[in-house]
Amino acid sequence: MSLVALSCLSLAAASSSAPPVATRMRHVVFHIGPGIALQVDDLAGRLVSRTSRPVLFDDVNSYVVDIDSARVAMTPESLTNLLNNYVFASGDAPLKNIKVGIEGQEMTQSGTLKKGVPVPFSIRAAIAATSDGKIRVHPTSIKAAGFLSKRVLDFFGLELENLVKMKNVAGVSVDGDDLILDPRSLLPPPQIRGRLTRAAIENGLLVQQFGAATSPKAIAPRNGRFTNYMYYRGGTLRFGKLTMRDADLLLVDSDPKDRFDFSPAQYNHQLVAGYSKNTRALGLIVYMPDLADLGPQSRQPAPAALRLARPELVEGRSRSGQAETRAASKRHP
């Protein structure tokens, strides 16, 4: 009986999840793929590990961003790259050569519909959020091969659903004439989890609001002077060969005149080009240059040794259990 009890306890311990790491992002351009970026005005939530082990910052597939509140936006260029290089990247995808634009309060899309013979198409559409937290793209005009207008489709009782099959296209479905986009599965990792409450075209961008405008759970750095940052607090956070328990990590834009241009895939190069400072509260502040400010040779994918490092082999901690940086090129005066 004691052996059975010990086995059950072992299984329970193995399946227990790691504590989440609270996060706050302010004025960040967050790169999630080649040419694909989210402009984060403000985000409050937490990083949740997909396994029982702590969050591994180096691996965007290892955690989920659980959002309480966020306001993010995407440029037409980012949307174009997202659709071509990620959403419709497979060889059997129904849409190809997509180009997204913004005209007034509407989104425009052009490209090629694979329907036996490739058919060029163009769409103008209004954007709104659905009641279940998705993005509805409602065409106000459709043209295929230069002449098949939405009015002709309506006359013959045809809907977009009859023309475009979204089989095996993650994050996209068709509802009558409307395209339905699911932000939770539409974007490259890290996966986001949160309820979309508003979607609209504003100032030439696709703007998305998750949750309420503000969150009572939102964390913020103790020093209120920072405007562009990513802050991580609580839980255990692993990055590179370091492990930070009771995490207190603040990544700061070293040039706050514009948004903090950050890439999870290349953050080590930004880290090496920056510097760090330990705080009296045993936390760590890292000042990093924008990704766009690094030279071409510096902006290379993180080496495999960094991405696949086993943090348990080298655990860099101070006597307090807080992590010390290994990437500081100089100390803050």
Image (tube, helix red, strand yellow):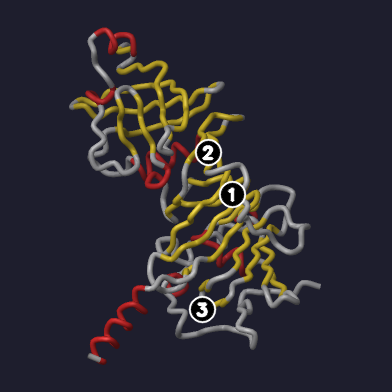
**10 Å crowding of disc 2: few (<14), some (14-19), many (20+):** many
The earlier-in-sequence mark between 2 and 1 is 1
Which numbered disc covers residue 29? Answer: 1
Identity, as a three-letter code, of the amino acid under mark 3: Lys
Comparing labels 2 and 1, the label whose residue is closer to the camera? 2
Pick out the residue farthest to the right. Answer: 333
Identity, as a three-letter code, of the amino acid under mark 1: Val
Q: Pointer 2: what residue?
A: 208
Query: Considering depth in this image, is 65 or 84 the residue closer to the camera?
Result: 65
Q: Secondary structure at mark 1?
A: strand
The earlier-in-sequence mark between 1 and 3 is 1
Query: Considering depth in this image, is 185 or 213 the residue closer to the camera?
Result: 213
Report how many numbered discs are placed on residues in the image. Answer: 3
Q: State the separation of the CA atoms marked 1 and 3.
A: 25 Å
Q: Pointer 3: what residue?
A: 241
Q: Quadrant of the N terminus?
A: bottom left
Q: State the separation of the CA atoms marked 2 and 3.
A: 35 Å
Q: State the separation of the CA atoms marked 2 and 1.
A: 15 Å
Determine the residue positioned at 20% across, 25% down. 117
Q: Is residue 38 left or right of residue 132?
A: right
Q: Secondary structure at mark 3?
A: loop
Determine the residue positioned at 42% across, 17% down. 140
Residue 48 sits above or below residue 151 on the image: below
